[in-house]
Image: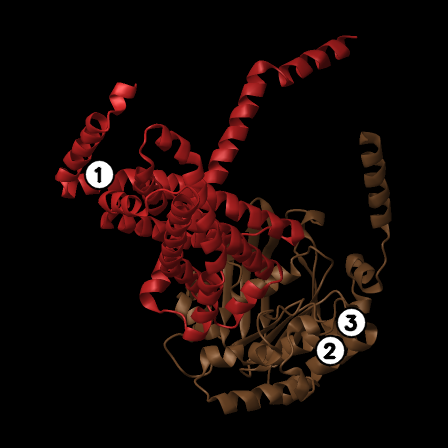
Chain colours: A red, B brown
Amino acid sequence: MSTATSSNSVGAQRHGPLRMAAEWLADLGGLVIAGLTVLGDFTLFTFRTFGWLFTRLPRKETLLPCFYQIGVLSLPVVALTGTFIGMVLVVQSYVQFRMLNMETRLGAVVNMAIVRELGPVLAATMLAGRVGSAMAAELGTMRVTEQIDALTTLGANPIHYLVVPRFLGCLLLIPALTIMADLMGIAGGFFYSVYLLDIDWHYYLENSRNFVGNFDVFAGVLKSMFFGAAISLIACHRGFNCDPGAEGVGRAATAAFVSSFVTILLLDLFLAIILDAIYYTVWPEGAKIIGCLWHDCLWHDGCLSML
Amino acid sequence: MTDAMPTAEDSNKTFAGPLVRLTGLCVSFGRQEVLRDITLDISRGETVAIIGESGCGKTVLLKTIIGLIRPTKGEVYFDGRNMCSLSEREQTRQRARFGFVFQGAALFDSMTVAQNVAFPLRQHTSKSQEEVRQIVLARLAEVGLPEDIVAKRPAELSGGMRKRVGLARALALEPEIILYDEPTTGLDPIMADVINELIISTRKRHPVTSVVVTHDMRTAQKVADRIVMLYPLARLEPDQPQILYDGPPEDIHRAADPRVVQFVRGEARERIMELREQYQRSDALL
């Protein structure tokens, strides 16, 4: 009897709130350590990639197939999605602008949204989905089938041979994809507005020209280069650290896309803030111009009276 | 630490000691210890078979020798140089003196057979395209593969052919030492014997040192001058040595250690009881 009681009390002690809290804390600590380990490993991986960039570039025959895969084969899908995004933006915004009798201003809004945000983000998302997951799966399979080890034993550095060409491909070709997404988005929006909604094309273009400046196009393209670098590094790192088996490869491909997508959106926010700050520091009059136009728009078009 | 043996660094003359020397080698992955205090010398021209059951650390030992895995403790000397203390560039240069035949051949899927065999030549030499082609054909002929195979992709080849292409690739630079990781696993008995014969003929044709990791006793008996048997650490007490046998192949049947005889004869013995207990335990849990 006494033995049973004592074992019960031991059991209660084992599962007491303090013990549970300690276990919870240990689990949390384990997660934090695992997260920091991955982050540290990723940082070293990035440094090694940059190290090779500045010491020896890969050969042309290694670079060109990567560039073809990343750039040329991604163009059609980026162009197609860009066109539809441009059209959808017009469809969604038209009613509100029509209510304010400002349909011709659609060009400014749609094109600004495409050039600054949707073009780069769309091109990056397509690249992460089409190329990023494929890269993680390919490198993951190479890891699982010991091909990465084979590279090392044959005297080739896997980061130099596999990661640097993919990194350069994404970094240098994503601006071209972004410009294509911008172009097709603008064309799609223009087509829908002018031919289907019968908006005056002259004022549509004139308003676009007044609002969308070179800096906006530059900001979008510059952002896309950060996205391209992040996609390639995340995908290659996931592939290199793939778990064994088919499940591991599948998980690496999915994780590469999810992590890249989250990173793209996070980077987008911070880069948007930084680029805006740069713009208003270098051209303080820009803020005033926007203020003036906003003011003109409110009073001369009589929007406030409608409210 | 690096003074454990005389070094050949900074000198071009051939080092007289063993080609590979492992001293107090320990390898752990996280908390899991795989190799403990392995001390082993492999002489020039010798063929050593490393045997042992699955999970005893044979492949880890092989990958540690070539520098794919860093030892947690201990040193790996290759031709008098401490491999662990070399710079990455120097390690790459030393690796050109090795050939490694992987368990699954590890051929690059994106390349043809010819490109696979030519890969080390393109990495380490500046030979012309024609010279490279001649070497590739010679190496493929050496492993008994026809010329018309060169344009094929690894996915189009059988397991035995892939292993032979893997061997041809490992031989491309005429290495001083070849490391074979389970060369006959997954092959039919005839193809396994073909690979065994290839290992022997390679040794006859080139003055190479060979380390063959296998759990196939026929391979070990046929190709090796010396057999080293490893035992899984999980089945050993902390003070017991991991190497159970180190000697000639003809004496292994008469080994004093019953665990060695059990492995050589392929007898399950107490393992059946262990399996039954485990099964009963999992049944009770369900």
* Residue furthest left as drawn: A285
Residue occupying image coordinates x 66% and y 53%: A246
Quarter of the rendering occupied by the C terminus of chain B: top right
Determine which quarter of the picture holds residue B102: bottom right
As rendered, which of B244 and A212 lies closer to the eye? A212
Q: Which residue is mark 2?
A: B195
Chain under numbered label 2: B
Residue B12 figure quarter:
bottom left
Q: Quadrant of the N terminus of chain B?
A: bottom left
Residue at which label 1 appears: A277
* Amino acid residing under circle 3: Asp
Horizontally, residue B165 falls left or right of residue A228, namely right
Q: Is residue A291 above or below residue A193?
A: above
Label 3: how many Cα within 10 Å (few below 14, some 14–19, many 20+):
few
- SS category of the residue bearing label 2: helix
Name the residue type under label 1: Ala
Pointers 3 and 1 within a single chain: no
Looking at the rendered structure, the secondary structure element under dot 1 is: helix
